């Protein structure tokens, strides 16, 4: 997918939708997969960062900044996952809009 020619040169976000489909954010069949990703993230990243002690303040600040950044990404994905119907309608509308647009 990364280095293949696009089957439709007017496709909307083909790489992003491909990655979201693999994670379970896009497509009907594997939507429960994203919940597994969030639980795995919580077990492997959140719990160890919040329960272990850091040796100095700088390490603690870097660790919490990383947790906030990655947590923000996963929470944004969880928001898209929870409003999937609206997200799907948005992508379909953008796809239909691109049929009428011409390249300049």
Image (cartoon, rainbow, N blue to C red):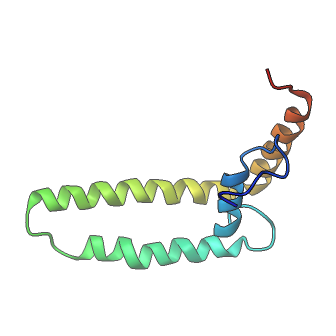
Quadrant of res 98: top right
Q: Residue at x 86, y 27 (%)?
A: 101
Residue 28 percent across, percent down from the top left? 81, 67
Quadrant placement of the N terminus: bottom right
Left or right, 90 with respect to 75, comes to right
Left or right, 17 with respect to 79, comes to right
Q: Nearer the viewer, residue 7 or 46?
A: 7
Q: Residue at x 46, y 73 (%)?
A: 41
Q: Nearer the viewer, residue 68 or 8?
A: 8
Q: Is residue 9 above or below residue 4?
A: above
Left or right, 11 with respect to 67, comes to right
Quadrant of res 103: top right
Q: Is residue 25 above or below residue 45?
A: above
Residue 93 percent across, percent down from the top left? 85, 39
Q: Residue at x 74, y 74 (%)?
A: 30
Q: Nearer the viewer, residue 69 or 83?
A: 69
Q: Residue at x 32, y 58 (%)?
A: 66
Count of numbered circles on the image = 0
Quadrant placement of the C terminus: top right
Residue 35 percent across, percent down from the top left? 60, 73
Q: Is residue 42 above or below residue 7?
A: below
């Amino acid at each position: 997918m990364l280095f293949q020619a696009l089957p439709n040169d007017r496709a909307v976000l083909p790489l992003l939708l491909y990655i979201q489909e693999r994670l379970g954010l896009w497509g009907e069949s594997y939507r429960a997969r994203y919940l597994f990703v969030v639980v795995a993230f919580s077990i492997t990243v959140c719990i160890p960062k919040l329960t272990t002690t850091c040796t100095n303040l700088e390490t603690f600040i870097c660790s919490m900044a990383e947790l906030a950044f990655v947590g923000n990404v996963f929470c944004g994905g969880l928001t898209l996952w929870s409003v999937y119907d609206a997200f799907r309608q948005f992508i379909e509308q953008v796809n239909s809009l691109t049929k009428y647009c011409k390249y300049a």
